[in-house]
Amino acid sequence: MAVSPVKIWRRQKEIRSLLHQRGNILSWTVIYAPSDEFKKNAPYTVVLVEFNNGDRAFGQLVECETDKVRIGMPVYSTLRKVREVSHEDVIAYGLKFKPSHHEKS
């Protein structure tokens, strides 16, 4: 599925304010049967995070084994590649989360 470079650009502008935010996991799940576009990543963990400022966002949890994920776990948001290069040579980046080594924030 092709994604318009304009849509990618607009989406990346929206996530700018969410980058490098710290928060805690409210809920999580493991995706075993994703759409074709994400099959090579399966299984992968998706988390719902509440940031310290009260905003919420969801995204893939990276650099963490599934058996280590827990509600309340401190994480921070980061920017990572979410799709392969499109036929327009555009690389799509999106919000993902990494475990924070700090205590619950």
Image (cartoon, grey):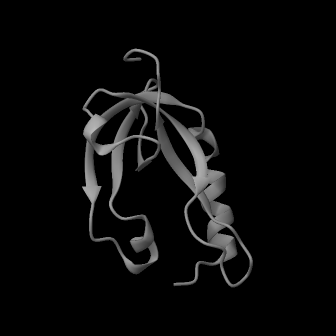
Q: As displayed, is residue 83 above or below residue 64?
A: below
Which residue sits furthest top? Answer: 103
Q: Is residue 62 left or right of residue 8?
A: left
Q: Quarter of the image holding residue 93? A: bottom right
Q: Nearer the viewer, residue 79 or 30?
A: 30
Is residue 55 shown left or right of residue 4?
left
Please say whether residue 69 is visible from this viewpoint. Answer: no
Is residue 43 rendered to the left or right of residue 92?
left
Name which residue lies at 63% across and 65% down: 92
Vertical arrangement, residue 21 with respect to residue 105, above or below? below
Residue closer to the observer: 17 or 49: 49
- In the rendered image, the vertical position of residue 93 relative to residue 50, given as above or below: below
12 left or right of 65 in image: right
Q: Answer with the quarter of the image where residue 73 lies.
A: top left
> Residue 51 or 42: which is nearer the viewer?
42
Q: Where is residue 24 in the image (x, y as percent from the top left)?
A: 37, 29
The residue at 35%/42% (across/down) is: 65
Question: Residue 1 appears at what percent x and percent y?
Answer: 51, 84
Please indicate, yes or no, whether residue 84 appears anywhere in the rendered image: yes
Q: Please state the horizontal and vertical placement of residue 2, each as a whole percent of the image.
A: 57, 83
